[in-house]
Image (cartoon, rainbow, N blue to C red):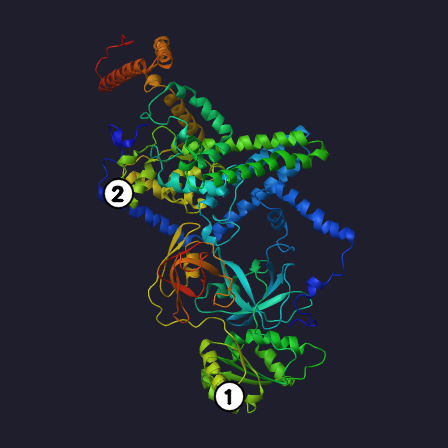
Amino acid sequence: MEPMTSTTLPGARSAAGGGRPGPLRRTLRDTIAPKVRQVADAAVTPLSIDDVLDHFHPLRGGSELRGRVVQVTPETPRSATVLIKPGRGWHGHVPGQFVRLGVDVDGVRLWRSYSLTHGPRPDGLISITVKMVPGGAVSTHLVRRVKPGTLVHLAPAEGDFVLPQPMPRKLLLVTAGSGITPVIGMLRNLFHKAEAPDVDIVLIHSALARAEVIFGREIRGYAEAGLLRLVELHTDTRGRLDVDELDQLVPDLAERPTYACGPVGLLDSLEEHHAARGLELFVERFRPVLLAEPGEGGTVTFAATGTDVEVAGDTAILDAAEDAGVLMPSGCRMGICMSCVLPLKEGTVRDLRNGELTHAVPGETHPDGVMVQTCITSAAGPCTFSH
Amino acid sequence: MTSITNKDVNPVAHLSPEDIEQIGLELDAIRQDILDIRGESDAKYIRRVVKVQRNLELGSRAVLLGSALPPLWVLGTVGLSVAKILENMEIGHNVMHGQWDWMRDPKIHSSTWEWDNASTAEGWKHSHNEIHHTYTNIIGKDNDLGYGIMRVDEEQKWVPMYLAQPLWNAINACFFEYGIAAYDLELGRNLRLPEERRTPGFKERAAATVKKIRKQATKDYVVNPLIALPFGSALPALAANFTANVVRNVWSHSVIMCGHFPEGVETFELNKIPEKETRGEWYVRQMIGSANISGSKLTHIMTGNLSHQIEHHLFPDLPSSRYAEIAPRVKALFEKYELNYHEAPLPQQVGSAWHKVVRLSLPNHWLETTNRSNVVEQSKLLYAMVTKGPKIRRLAQRRLDQMARKQAEQKAAADAGTPLTVVESVPA
């Protein structure tokens, strides 16, 4: 692993080089620069000067955020860490946050979210660790096919699954499978400091087998060094973690805020368990919980382009529209980040998580339409978006 | 050409409704095969073309800074012309068709692309993608047929004004981008109508077009020449930009003429198109209403693969780079159903299209009944048709029709081997 020595938080870079600019610099920035840009844009229309600069330097500041793959390192037979040099527009992250990554798989731009697996690094690189999902186009591409040098698209780091400041004295981390990825970022950030933090950490990590444990050597190393207590569970031999075992595994459970990330089943039962006992719990979900029987779909019309898309009842409008070639705003794809919201002008849509219906009636609902998260809603009959 | 329903021999008369639907199925299968395999290599292709185009354009503009030196002027102008052609044909036209939308790249998408042309992307997508591609070669419906200013069919009544149409066509070729912008707006029709009866949104679209034209002109005729000014090349740079625009205009005009204008390409009557045209019927109309240009790979790229006009009209949203690949299968289908796969090299197709423009600028049958020995009488006849009233025109037309009929009979007789009676001219 790379050495980590920095604890800089987001915004550090933008603040660098600060100080009050002199009058000359102010004139340059406020008066001359926009003029130069105007002339440059006029010289290359219908492109903008940004398009031209991106053509030569895709990672420059001011460009749409991108990154270049630096290295791909296998972690287990089915997972790999992808090290990325982000463009100059990257404003850093807090360990535990995730990044949205757009990669071209078989020519098609696909976006997924991945936890960042390092704290901020001195070399400015960021890393994600990807576990191959059966049938997963992006994860398979990243683990098996992506080569150093490839350009990927990025969005600024997001997510509130981060450790509190100041740190609590005791902490329980419950992870399973690739759920270790946001947590390893937190641990690396904590443990790279010259002075080990005064926090008592228990990590319960489940994986199919010893060989399948992502970052296995590293977390065992932390345990040996006395930095945390590790409970490593191999589900092929002992079965899945039962939340009722927690009291036995962690006798002082009630004193520890719990941070959990893993499969839906684990998180659901943890939520139930902790809620019943009034314990503090923070979870990071990789995908939303969807309805088992979503109901009928419908035809979605995108008024701006006049495109009609058939949306099956169990499919998100976002997915169906993208498959039909409509350019859609998208984000986390699990109903959290609100990047995908579009105004529904007319018709009814169904929330795929809880079956809730949202209606838009021209003349009755808001004239600009009802904002709808397209990534977790499906059509319930014909509906129209002004997009 | 005469619309197929008014022809003696209808080229699709031998097809049963079942045949037509079968053609539809077979074409759908070809389309699906490409959808199944399109992927990384296609994405690589279009990104490479975009990259080459941008390098070429920026490089040429850099060279034009020194365009006071004649060799640099020539080099820069050729480069810029080619760059503009690539941008409009292989990139702009095809991107705006949505051929690359499946990549989900917002930078190469039909909804975001703006092209290096006087016409706005929005206007073009409407008039071209919706109107022309849906109503291909339907007289009165498809503005691509003569752009509303030319006589493109025998059935359009001839009036003396049409004599000038070869000239119009030549001027239109030189300033084609403005012609397109005007006809995207349906400018002629809208300006004739009182304001309240114009196409909804006409005013906004006209304003957008004026803005686009101003931006384009500012780039080519103001900013870039000014950048060349310190190098003493302002005027040569301006001339180079103008030349490149004209070259691009003439080239794209020629290619587009080849797509639907050459002799032998069919046109259709609106009232003979079924109310609910089936997919098969639509396909067949595209098949016989388009013409291809044969040639090298370079020809195909420089024409934006509109050299595969037939394939393009059948599958306007398949990546252009795939047309060459499916052409043999499409051609085989034409042969199987005994349809004419109209294909010829560029000079021949351009010649044929121009021949038609000239032929139809004259009264019906005038050109074919004129030969060296009767050229004087024919000219007198034409002069009378131009200068005298509609009555004379009608009579003279009747005479031309008669002559043409005789000529056809003689030709038939000659083909049959019977000795011919030579008729030099028909007495008035």
For residue B98, above or below residue A367? above
For image coordinates 68% across by 82% down, the residue present is: A197
For image coordinates 42% across by 65% down, the residue present is: A377
Same subunit: marks 2 and 1: no
Query: In the rendering, at what x and y percent does residue A324 appear?
Result: 41, 55
For image coordinates 54% across by 68% down, the residue present is: A114
| Quarter of the picture holding the N terminus of chain B | top left
Q: Is residue B297 visible?
A: no
The amino acid type found where label 1 is placed reads Leu
The amino acid type found where label 2 is placed reads Ile
C-alpha gap between disc 2 and disc 1: 70 Å
In front: B350, or B121?
B121
Labelled disc at residue B147: none
Which residue was labeled with disc 1?
Answer: A246
Q: Is residue B105 visible?
A: yes
Mark 2, Cα crowd under 10 Å, few <14 / some 14-19 / many 20+, is: many
Q: Secondary structure at mark 1?
A: helix
For residue B347, above or below residue A292? above
Q: Secondary structure at mark 2?
A: helix
Which residue was labeled with disc 2?
Answer: B20
Task: Pinpoint the chain carrying mark 2.
Answer: B
Determine whether, in the image, residue A156 is placed left or right of residue B203: right
In front: A289, or B207?
B207
| Quarter of the picture holding the C terminus of chain B | top left
Query: In the rendering, at what x and y percent does residue B333 appear?
Result: 31, 42
For residue A242, above or below residue A76? below
Circle 2 or circle 1, nearest the eye: 1
